[in-house]
Amino acid sequence: MLTIGCHLSSSKGFLAMGKEAVKIGANTFQFFTRNPRGGKAKELDLSDIEAYLEYAGEHGIGKILAHAPYTLNACAKDPDLRRFAYDTMCDDLRRLQYIPQAMYNFHPGSHVKQGVEQGVSYISDLLNRIGGQGGQTTILLETMAGKGTEMGRSFEELSVIIDNVEEKSRLGVCLDTCHVFDGGYDIVGSLDEILGEFDCIIGLDRLKAVHLNDSKHGLGSHKDRHEKIGEGQIGLETFVKIVTHPKLRELPFYLETPNDLDGYQREIALLRERAEIEKT
Ligand code: FE
Ligand code: FE
Ligand code: ZN
């Protein structure tokens, strides 16, 4: 069975997210660890987490995905900003120890004219300093669209970052379909070739999650504007190929499309239905 969900608001806590997920036919979900623009996280509510874990067990919600605030910049020029990214990630990881099934996804950052090499070095340095503090949590670098000086725009960039991290047993990649398409990888015309490239450069064993987003703009546009599934430049058939692909179908999939809960419910139902049909 497909593991699929969407991004949910974490404002009402974990049990509320679990119930919302089940209501819309999801068996996983993604959430921001705190206000996506950064700032202080809410106190952990251990009774909420306990209730959530029980509910998740009963309803077949397995791996979920925590998303770091997207304003963090692990490769900022200002050491205070890099420090802030490190402190926030450590705090997030400490909190995630209470949710054993969670993985932790972050945007590698923007090098802002310092150059890719400096960016790589700051990001891998941060991951090295985090070291074992993540406990059991797998940390994922997200593939980015390459807007401005965004890092992670190519498989090579991610691979160099990973290569420079000493302890990489709990390091992985989250592939965002809109971002890679926007970054110039033609997943519509050559999905198998792109996956082959990913395998050669990073290794498919590092791929731990997929963000399912259609793209408002065309191949290689570096704009990063998500669109509803089937309403953008990627198109429904490619998403059906992705969720049924032998090398991808066991992964958890997360919708980050511009939708309300009803819209997410429809996209989940559609992809589940198409995945069932492809099986037969
Ligand atoms: Fe993201
Ligand atoms: Fe994403
Ligand atoms: Zn995006």
Image (cartoon, rainbow, N blue to C red):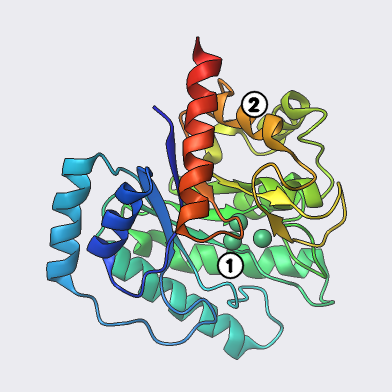
On screen, 147 above or below 214? below
The residue under label 1 is which amino acid type? Asp
Dot label at residue 90: none
Q: Residue at x 51, y 63 (%)?
A: 128
x then y, percent, for residue 239 = 64, 34
Mark 2 element type = helix
Q: Nearer the viewer, residue 109 or 20?
A: 20
* In-image side of 143 versus 172 (left or right): right
Is 95 situated above or below 52? below
Where's residue 256, x and y in %?
57, 56
Q: CA distance from mark 1 to mark 2?
A: 37 Å
Q: Residue at x 80, y 27 (%)?
A: 190
What residue would you read off at disc 1? 125
Percent coordinates x, y for residue 105 in the rendering = 50, 58
Give me the residue at 43% from left, 31% from top. 2
Q: Residue at x 43, y 62 (%)?
A: 8
Mark 2 within 8 Å of ligand 2, using the beta carbon: no
Extreme residue in the top direction: 280
Rendered location of residue 187, percent (x, y): 76, 35
Q: Is residue 147 above or below residue 58?
A: below
| Ligand 3's quadrant | bottom right
Crowd band around label 2 with a 10 angstrom C-alpha radius: few (<14), some (14–19), many (20+) = some
Residue 268 visible in the picture: yes
Instruction: Look at label 2 and name its amino acid.
Output: Lys
Q: For the N terminus, which image quadrant?
A: top left
Judging by the rendered image, the residue that carries numbered circle 2 is 241
In this view, the residue in front, 91 or 242, is 242
Q: Which one is closest to the eye, mark 1 or mark 2?
A: 2
Is residue 245 shown above or below 260?
Answer: above
Question: Does dot 1 land on a helix, a strand or a loop?
Answer: helix
